[in-house]
Image: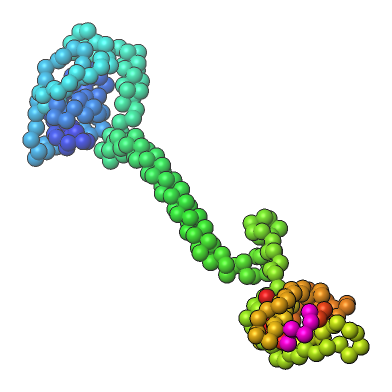
């Protein structure tokens, strides 16, 4: 009789005495595989190289091929070499052996799969952890990109009424303070002026001026600085007038002077004497 190792495919000759020692369980002397010789028993002589079984070792499984690389646990306790075990002992030996090699299948593919199970589980766990780290990194990069884009185009978004109102309600931006009215005295031009003695009141000079706003937008009413001059064009008196002093009663001071609007002003000043023959006006 012959049997073949399911792992290394080595062919080994057998006898009935060898099979009876451990109810068919043997150990391959070439690869140390423990298997049931009865499952691979054959009456034909295989072309593969064959090895004879070693002599009876008493407390170990029969080792086929005459080469043992390691000792195995005693499975069948049969102190008398060559003596068949009792039926009860044989049954116990079979159960013990099955529990020992329960994870080893006679199919080499199944054995290889079982051997790699632990390694595959560890690789899957490592791969899952790696994937979670990559996912977290991708989320962080995405959030950073969104924040960067939002900050870059913040002025454009804040011009949208809905976004602007939402930002105001949530305190993201401060309410805009009302800007003061535009003021540019250099863009106010004097159109006409005149000075004469008051016709009915003694010691009063009447000054008449007209000016226009040349700016492209409404601007604040200017402050007037009037300087009286003598015959040598030297100043002899000066006065500064706020808008409330030269505008008519009831005028809206906050409305400002609209573009291209001519504003006539009539002023009455005390006459400093015959020395005052002219005046000049400045817009402040």
The answer to whether any part of residue 153 appears in the image is yes
Q: Is residue 88 placed above or below 197 in the rendered structure?
A: above
Residue 191 falls in image quadrant: bottom right
Question: Residue 168: within the magenta?
Answer: no
Tell me the residue at 22%/36% (across/down).
6
- Look at the image and tell me in which quarter the C terminus lies: bottom right
Q: Is residue 274 magenta?
A: yes
Is 180 or 15 nearer to us in this picture? 180
Looking at this view, name the residue that lies furthest to the right: 200
Is 119 left or right of 259, judged from the image as shown?
Answer: left
Q: Which residues are magenta?
A: 272-277
Q: Is residue 207 left or right of residue 95?
A: right
Residue 209 image point, x, y percent: 76, 87
Judge by depth and name the residue closer to the eye, 243 or 278: 278
Residue at image position (21%, 12%) is: 59
Image quadrant where residue 262 sits: bottom right
Q: Is residue 198 above or below residue 128?
A: below
Q: Position of residue 197 (x, y in %)?
A: 83, 88
Q: Main secondary structure of the magenta part?
A: loop
Above or below, 223 against 201 in this view is above
């Amino acid at each position: 009789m012959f049997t073949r190792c399911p792992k290394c495919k080595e062919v080994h000759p057998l006898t009935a005495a060898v099979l009876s020692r451990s109810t068919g369980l043997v150990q391959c002397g070439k690869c140390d595989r423990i298997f049931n010789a009865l499952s691979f028993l054959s009456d034909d002589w295989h072309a593969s190289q064959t090895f004879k079984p070693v002599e009876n070792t008493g407390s170990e499984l029969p080792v086929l091929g005459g080469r043992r690389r390691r000792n195995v646990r005693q499975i069948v306790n049969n102190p008398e070499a060559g003596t068949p075990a009792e039926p009860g002992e044989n049954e116990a030996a079979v159960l013990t052996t099955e529990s020992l090699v329960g994870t080893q299948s006679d199919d080499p593919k199944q054995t290889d799969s079982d051997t790699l199970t632990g390694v595959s589980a560890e690789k899957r766990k490592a791969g899952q952890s790696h994937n979670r780290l990559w996912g977290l990194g991708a989320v962080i990069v995405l959030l950073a990109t969104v924040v960067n884009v939002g900050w870059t185009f913040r002025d454009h978004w804040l011009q949208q009424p809905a976004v602007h109102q939402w930002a105001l309600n949530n305190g993201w931006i401060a309410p805009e303070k009302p800007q003061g009215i535009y003021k540019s005295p250099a863009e106010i031009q004097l159109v006409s002026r005149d000075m004469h003695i008051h016709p009915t009141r003694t010691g009063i000079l009447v000054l008449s001026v007209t000016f226009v706003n040349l700016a492209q937008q409404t601007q604040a009413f200017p402050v007037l600085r009037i300087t009286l001059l003598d015959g040598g064009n030297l100043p002899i008196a000066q006065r500064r007038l706020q808008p409330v002093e030269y505008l008519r009663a009831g005028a809206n001071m906050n409305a400002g002077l609209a573009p291209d609007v001519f504003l006539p002003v009539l002023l009455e000043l005390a006459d400093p004497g015959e020395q005052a023959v002219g005046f000049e006006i400045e817009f402040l």
